[in-house]
Structure formats: C-alpha cells, structure tokens
C-alpha cells in the first residue's frame, strides 16, 4: 500500500494459492536458511510484510464462503470483498473502513471499524483460524483445539505464530444505518473535541463515531477542517436525538449537518471512500483490471489509546500540534475513534487483545501524494514525533498493534500490556526458534 517501502527488494516473492503452497514455501525457506515474512493485504504501516528475504504472499487465498451463521474467509480476502459477500445475506463481519486491508493482518491484531462499539472488535468474532506453523504443520485452532494459540491469534498481531491461511467468523445481522456528518469551524475545535470525548465513548452501543481534523496542505495559512462523522445502527430518530445532545454539549451550532438513512452497502462503500465504485473497482491498481485505488506515495502515522478524559488544556495542545512546523505539500490529519460499548465488555485477558478499557483512540498522520517534496519524509517524521510527544503526555501508554509504529520505544507493553508474558509463552511453544521474526515480533 505504501510506496515508501518499494526500495526493499526481497530475494523472492512466493505467491501462494493454497495452504499446501504455504507449507512448501515455509519448508523451502527453512531448509535454505532464508528469512521470510508474510504478506496478505500489504497494509503494514511499518512495512513489516516485506523484507530482504522471502515474502510469502497469501493474497491469492481470498475465497469467502457464507454458510448459515459462519463466514469462512481466506487470509488474503480484502474487506471490500468480505462486505460484498456477507451483505448479500444481510450479514457483516465487524472489521474496518479500508477496502483493501486484508484479513491476514487485520484479524490477528484486533480490527476496529463501524461495528466495534455495537458488536466488538474483529477478534471477538473469530471462531477459528487455520495456520501453517514454522515446522510446516497446518493446524486449526479454536476453543477446543490449540486453545492457547486460539487465544494468542486474537490480538497477538500478524507475523508472530504462523501463517494464517483461513479464518472462520461469527457474523452479525445488519440493516440500514443513519450515516451522519457534522462540521464545525476550527475555532470551535476544543469545545467540539471536549464534548465528543465525554459523549461518544459513553453513548449507547448503536453509535459509531470518529472525529477527523484535517489540513490539506500543511504549508500554513489554511485552518484545518473538523468533521464529526459516524453511523447509528439503531432507530434513526433516537440517533438524531443523540446527535442533538452532542451539539447541545458543544454549545455551538455546527456549520453543516447531514444525517441520512442509507443501506449498509452504500454506507460502507462511502466510508471506504469508494462511493459509486463496484467492489471490483475498490481495489488497488494492479490487483485486477478494474481496480481504481492508487497506492500512497508516503504516509506516516503515530497514535495511541486514551483511557480517560483529556482536560481542556491538554486538548488545546493536541490540536495546536496539527499546525505545528508548517511544511508545504504535506496533508495532515488528527483522527479520534470512539471506543467503549461491546468491545470494552470483554475482559482484557479473555483474548490477546488487551485494549478493553479505552475511551478512544487518537492518532496523527502525515501523507504526501502523489508528489513527495524534497526533505518531505524527514519533515513529516520530525513533525509527527513532536505531535506524538504531545499526545503521549495524555494517552494511556497503549498503542494499537495493527497500527505498528516502528519508532515506539516500549512497543511490547504498548501493544500487549499484561498479556505480554502469556503471548511470549505461546510464541515459545509454537515458534521457539523464531522462524517468524521482524523488528517488533513477540
Ligand atoms: C490505509 C489503511 C487503512 C487502515 N484501516 C484500518 C481500519 O479501518 N481498521 C483497522 O483495525 N485497521 C486498519 N488498518 C490497519 C490494518 O489493520 C493493519 O495494517 C493490518 O495489519 C493490515 O493487514 P494486511 O494483511 O492488509 O497487511 P500486511 O502488510 O500484509 O500484514 C500486516 C502484518 O501482518 C502480517 N501478516 C499478514 N498476513 C498474515 C497472515 N496470513 N498470517 C500471519 N501474519 C500475517 C504481516 O507479516 C505484517 O506483519 C489500516 C491500515 C492502512 C494502511
């Protein structure tokens, strides 16, 4: 997905079509002493699905089958295809809002999206996973078979225990949604974020809500745009009342307000930024002849979970960081994702996904596309490190293992918290020789 990792030249890329292909690739790499990494959708923010050795690419394992109340999907299945297949049955597997992210990475590390507050994280719907292990065995783990591995793959993150080839999920029934979008001028930002952080995480589970603060060109001179957006899974009038509660708490009328009842498919395609695309078009260019989504030239992001309300002084600092160190040609965003709800009612040690007490996630990102200006990457990293320094005065110290951050100091604690020791024992049991390894491997 990110072109900034294109300079890394693997010795070989093995494109697999079956679990047997994967086992053969693992056996070959082992017997020749070649390091290997796995790739499904290629969306690792840190570039951990590529490397100088062998890339075992399982994007070809993308079969999806909906049978009654079980959805089986290959690790290479991308979110747009998963929604396309399940929505034909008025079902969805709670995942995320990027069409081309694949299950191989997302489902092992958590999975945050429009359904998280109502139904939980992707890992909470994982019934079983089939993996090719470092010794070449193919095993299926679930509640009864390899229960320690089953626990670990629900949040332990990609690239750690084996190569996932197939997952089984318990889907949820879905219907129409109230899709809403409210904007405020930048001068109201502190009031909006303050009201939102006290409102969204404690709202009924039917609410999904994010804030996007974005500035198209961070060269200075233009104020960031501020949008509160999301969906309401319940009865529309109740959703509208809840939005009114937010605007009352902000104490300032939004500059614009839209709240429309839409069917799930149209809504998710819009959230994918693929409004009007067919599922075939909602793929990265090169994935198929119809694909229309371009890869990012350069992107960097850093963020973390917040377990408590940030005081107004802290919010002002977080917001001021967006326009700090102006640099022309850089798009910047600060995103907040509301948590709470069903995802937080699972115990932190019930699965390896430990982040069950957070009110929201917040993260900065800088993108340059299609042109990366001279010194752009250095400037983006300097800016984001400064912004992250501000953020880390207020966060919980926890970070999302699906948003891997190669510059994070204490990443083990940040991704896994009190589940780390148990994850290390599972790693020892299934991959004692660390055949599966990368800079932030367990
Ligand atoms: C543009 C963008 C949007 C995103 N949106 C969301 C979102 O809405 N919600 C959300 O929760 N996350 C989101 N993410 C984060 C995403 O969940 C992670 O980056 C995830 O790891 C990507 O999985 P992948 O298979 O596409 O990526 P890859 O780069 O292929 O893999 C990511 C990691 O998992 C490992 N891995 C891949 N496949 C397998 C496998 N089959 N078995 C074992 N390990 C494997 C890789 O080695 C690598 O370490 C987004 C990321 C990007 C870049």
Image (tube, rainbow, N blue to C red):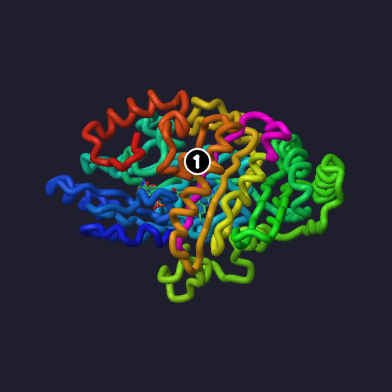
- Left or right: residue 157 compared with residue 328: left
Residue at 66% in and 63% down: 266
**Is 113 drawn above or below residue 374 in the view shown?**
above
Residue 310, can we see it? yes
**Is 414 drawn above or below residue 90 in the view shown?**
above
In the picture, residue 195 is in which quadrant?
Answer: top right
> Where residue 33 sits: x, y (%)?
14, 46
Front-most of residues 85 and 441: 441
Q: Is residue 313 magenta?
A: yes
Residue at 39% in and 24% down: 422
Residue at 55% in and 48% down: 95
Front-most of residues 379 and 209: 379
- Residue that numbered label 1 is attached to: 110
Q: Residue furthest bottom?
A: 289
> Where residue 90 sits: x, y (%)?
63, 55
Q: Residue furthest left?
A: 32
Quarter holding the N terminus is bottom left
Quarter holding the C terminus is top left
Q: Is residue 348 magenta?
A: no
In the picture, residue 40 is in which quadrant?
Answer: bottom left
Residue at 32% in and 38% down: 161
> Where residue 400 sits: x, y (%)?
50, 39
Q: Which residues are magenta?
A: 297-316
**Label 1: which secondary element:** loop
Within 10 Å of the Cα at label 1, are there few (<14), some (14-19), or many (20+) other Cα atoms? many
> Where residue 253 sits: x, y (%)?
86, 51
Residue 86, can we see it? no
Q: Is mark 1 within 8 Å of ligand 1?
A: yes
- Left or right: residue 96 compared with residue 175: left
Front-most of residues 284 and 165: 284
């Amino acid at each position: 997905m990110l072109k900034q990792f294109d300079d890394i030249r693997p010795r070989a890329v093995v494109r697999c079509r079956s679990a047997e292909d994967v086992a053969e690739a693992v056996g070959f790499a082992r017997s020749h002493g070649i390091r290997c990494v796995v790739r499904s959708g290629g969306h690792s923010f840190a570039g951990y699905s590529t490397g100088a050795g062998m890339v075992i690419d399982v994007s070809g394992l993308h079969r999806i089958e909906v049978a009654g109340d079980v959805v089986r999907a290959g690790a290479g299945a991308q979110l747009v295809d998963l929604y396309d297949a399940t929505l034909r049955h008025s079902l969805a597997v709670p995942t995320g809002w990027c069409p081309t992210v694949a299950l191989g990475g997302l489902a092992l590390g958590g999975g945050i999206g429009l359904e998280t507050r109502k139904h939980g994280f992707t890992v909470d719907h994982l019934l079983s996973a089939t993996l090719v292990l470092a010794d070449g065995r193919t095993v299926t783990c679930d509640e009864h078979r390899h229960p320690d591995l089953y626990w670990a793959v629900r949040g332990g993150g990609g690239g750690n225990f084996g190569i996932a080839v197939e997952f089984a999920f318990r889907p949820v029934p879905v219907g129409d949604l109230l899709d809403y979008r409210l904007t405020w001028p930048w001068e109201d930002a502190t009031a909006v974020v303050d009201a939102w952080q006290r409102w969204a995480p404690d709202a009924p589970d039917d609410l999904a809500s994010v804030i996007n603060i974005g500035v198209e060109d961070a060269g200075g001179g233009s104020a960031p745009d501020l949008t509160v957006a999301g969906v309401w899974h319940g009865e529309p009038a109740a959703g509208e009342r809840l939005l009114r509660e937010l605007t009352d708490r902000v104490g300032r009328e939004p500059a614009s307000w839209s709240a429309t009842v839409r069917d799930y498919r149209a809504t998710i395609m819009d959230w994918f930024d693929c409004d009007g695309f067919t599922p075939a078009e909602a793929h990265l260019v090169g994935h198929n002849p119809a694909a229309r989504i371009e890869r990012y030239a350069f992107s960097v992001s850093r963020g973390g979970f917040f377990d408590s309300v940030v005081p107004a002084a802290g919010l002002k600092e977080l917001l001021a960081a967006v326009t700090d160190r102006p640099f022309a040609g850089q798009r910047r965003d600060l995103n907040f994702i509301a948590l709470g709800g069903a995802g937080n009612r699972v115990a932190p040690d019930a699965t390896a996904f430990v982040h069950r007490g957070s009110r929201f996630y917040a993260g900065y990102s800088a993108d340059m596309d299609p042109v990366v200006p001279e010194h752009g990457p250095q400037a983006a990293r300097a800016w984001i490190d400064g912004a992250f320094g501000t953020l880390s005065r207020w966060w919980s110290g926890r970070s999302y293992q699906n948003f891997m951050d190669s510059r994070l100091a204490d990443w083990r604690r940040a991704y896994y918290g009190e589940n780390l020791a148990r994850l290390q024992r599972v790693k020892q049991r299934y991959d004692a020789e660390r055949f599966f390894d990368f800079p932030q491997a367990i």
